[in-house]
Image (cartoon, rainbow, N blue to C red):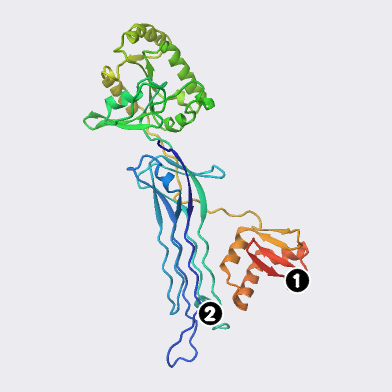
Amino acid sequence: MSFDVARIHVKGGDGGNGAVSFRREKYVPFGGPDGGDGGRGGSVYLVVNPQRNTLNYFQRRPSFKAAPGKPGRGKDQTGADGHDVTVEVPPGTVVRDAGTGAVYGDLVKPGQRLLVARGGRPGKGNARFATPTNQAPRMATNGEPGEERTLLLELKLIADVGLFGKPNAGKSTFLAATTAARPKIADYPFTTLQPNLGVVDLGADDGFVLADIPGLIEGASRGAGLGHEFLRHVERTRVLIHLVDGASPDPLGDYRAIHAELSAVGHALDAKPQIVCLNKIDLPEAQDKWPAFESSLKAEGVEAHAISAATQRGTREVLYLALQMLRELPLPEAEPTPAEIPVPRPAGPGFRIRRLPDASWRVEGAPVELAAVRSRFDSEEALMRFHRTLEKMGVIDALREAGVKEGDTVWIGTDYELEWRE
């Protein structure tokens, strides 16, 4: 079975912690601070590999984590950066947020990259905090956690021409007869459960990519059969070949039912150029139905073609007609995709204060919680620096306005418990 939707979890590496260190050299009685910064955490990238054509790989490996940065060391040694992780995806992969469904990128070009999880910024060593008035700082900062998110990958087939029609119309046979693709062929509904691609070679560097799309049935626009699996793969194609089963009891009814379903699906699929073919014309029952089928469609302004995918009768002419249509159509413009997922910026103050049932207080907000994560709390200097950070953010004044009192417990996020002292 082929998977064209995958859910993956990605996490950038945490930044390395800064170091607290002082020079210890012979004949230097008062060595200064020499704690180095940590290394930056590795990032996670999605990159298009044209050799991949499914998302099956992500069923076995749904999680990707980049390496963390190394901590800084004495003698002003900066920690090594964490290694990036590159995740290969097939062309036509749409990247969405698994929670909101927001589209982050549409990856179609070979080599195209999208940064999906940034590595954390490194912590600062104590050498960074030396000033003329504080020549021996005993504080450093922790590295920033790497970004973490869950993504939904959706594969939309990239093909020039798409074959569609009812199950058993002969699409897989047509693809096998006209390309080097070898799809599964059998005489029962929904032989094709996933799209198959083949390259049509018409000589003299002429050709195009042909896709056998899973069968469309009545009610597909409402979720029947393979439902919107059809839509996902047909909306990128530029020309459609509608195969009608000539051995069906009512080929004309089949054509009209599927054409109506195409209109109901939406996305302007019924406006795409179409080539209508009555397949299996090598069979006597198809030959008997061909005159009425052709004349009925001609009266509606639609040209029909009689073909046999099994004997390749008429298939070459249909391929050349599709090639001519492709040449006359303008090339599609790709949607611009950013090189990285934008960083969300909080609106307003970026935090909120809540009174908890036990009479303690909780301050929530990404900027405040990140400041707590990066602080060490292992020295008076570090505590005072964190206090000044909260003052700049407006948290201290907001707590006072909310009614905080001496001795109250104040939580920063869910992990950091402090006691309020004026």
**Mark 2 burial class by Cα count in 10 Å: few <14, some 14-19, many 20+:** some
- State the residue at coordinates (41%, 68%): 80
Label of residue 130 in the image: 2
Outermost residue, bottom side: 27
**Left or right: 128 in relation to 317:** right
Q: Residues within 10 Å of mark 1 (few under 14, many from 20)?
A: few
Residue 274 shown left or right of residue 201 in the figure: right
**268 or 88: nearer the viewer:** 88
* Horizontal and vertical percent position of residue 361: 72, 62
Q: From the viewer's perspective, tell me whether residue 193 is left or right of residue 350.
A: left
Q: Quadrant of the N terminus?
A: top left
Q: Residue at x 40, y 39 (%)?
A: 92
Residue 391 higher or lower than 61, as above or below: below
Question: In the rendered structure, which disc, 2 or 1, sits on the residue that comes first in sequence?
Answer: 2
As drawn, the label of residue 407 is 1
**Mark 2 vs mark 1, CA separation in Å:** 33 Å
Q: Secondary structure at mark 1?
A: loop
Q: Disc count in the image?
A: 2
Q: Is residue 174 above or below residue 15?
A: above
Residue, x 40% and y 13% (percent of image)?
A: 248
